[in-house]
Image (cartoon, grey):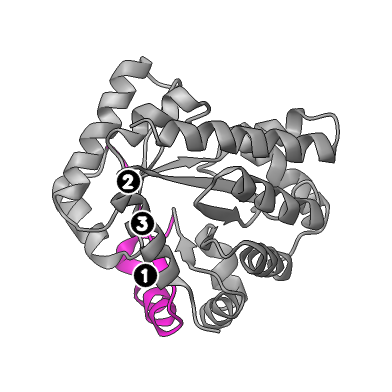
Amino acid sequence: MSGNIELLNTTLAATRAADRAALIAYLPAGFPTVDGGIEAVKAVIAGGADIVEIGLPHSDPVLDGPVIQTADDIALRGGVRIADVMRTVREAHEATGVPILVMTYWNPIDRYGVERFTAELAEAGGAGCILPDLPVQESALWREHADKHGLATVFVVAPSSQDARLATITAAGSGFVYAASLMGVTGTRASVGAQAQDLVGRTRATTDLPVCVGLGVSNAAQAAEVAGFADGVIVGSAFVKAMLDAPGEAAGLAAVRSLAGELAEGVRKR
């Protein structure tokens, strides 16, 4: 099976044609268990997620907040392995037909082997990878193998990225651009939203790729706000928190499905 970058591209084109942003959900593999994690992915898709990112749990997730770190720790203590990540991608994609990406730090791929990782991800039906800590200038080997297997390479840009740097990053990427910002952590919500909107505008000036924003969005109103200026709204911690706060797995699945429904409604109110 070849990779599914075309499915990712057509999904994002379809949401754009419908004059709305895509809802992109993030959940870590192996949380709360491997089987439970697969069911959680199915639940967010049933609730309305258009695309899903599967996190590859890492012992030092430097870019993730405490909620995702907690989930990663649970997954790692449960013994999750890259094979489990691939199984999560395969079973979620086969059950739903939705594009599934993996979000991972570079070190696990480097240790596993780039050719092996890309071949297995494509065989599992994966659409590509989001690589938040892989510098573009060091990405040639990854991109060579990703292209060979039909996988998207999604790079992350930040408000601190200068325009020339944005152009370099977007020229090397495929699928979409992940625009990272903060909401409710530094400064006021209004100023942070403006910062994200500025980043999207500056990124779009360098590329025709869709620009999707991860902003700490946790409710329909925030999703609608970001959908007003971005091609996709990425939600992670809110889904993980819903699972962590639930009294049991069944309640957790119901909670993430419900949250996905609220967020899906939000992105349609742009």
Q: Is residue 150 magenta?
A: yes
Q: Residue furthest top?
A: 188
Residue holding disc 2: 231
Identify the amino acid type marked 3. Answer: Ala
On residue 59, which mark appears?
Answer: none
Q: Amino acid at mark 2?
A: Asp
At label 1, which amino acid type do we have? Answer: Ser
Q: Do labels 1 and 2 touch, CB within 8 Å?
A: no
Verify CB contact (< 8 Å) between mark 3 and mark 1.
no
- Indicate which disc, 2 or 3, sits on the residue closer to the N terminus: 3
Q: Which mark is residue 14?
A: 3
Residue under numbered circle 1: 139
Number of the front mark, 1 or 2: 2
Secondary structure of the residue carrying tag 3 is helix
In the rendered image, which quarter is residue 13 located in? Answer: bottom left
Alpha carbon separation for disc pair 2 and 3: 11 Å
Q: Nearer the viewer, mark 2 or mark 3?
A: 3
In percent of the image, x 56 and y 40: which residue is there? Answer: 236
**Residue at (64, 53) in percent of width and height:** 58
Q: Is residue 176 left or right of residue 205?
A: right
Residue 76 point in image, percent of width and height: 76, 53
**Image quadrant containing the C terminus:** top left
**What's drawn in magenta, residue-wise?**
133-159
Note whether residue 237 is visible: no
Q: Position of residue 124 (x, y in %)?
A: 62, 75
Mark 2: secondary structure:
loop
Q: Residue at x 56, y 84 (%)?
A: 1
- Give the Cα separation between the discs numbered 1 and 2: 25 Å
Question: Could you classify mark 1 by the number of other residues whose Cα lies within 10 Å: few (under 14), some (14-19), or many (20 or more)?
Answer: some
Is 243 colored magenta in this rendering?
A: no
Dot 2, how many residues are within 10 Å of its Cα: few (below 14), some (14-19), or many (20+)?
many
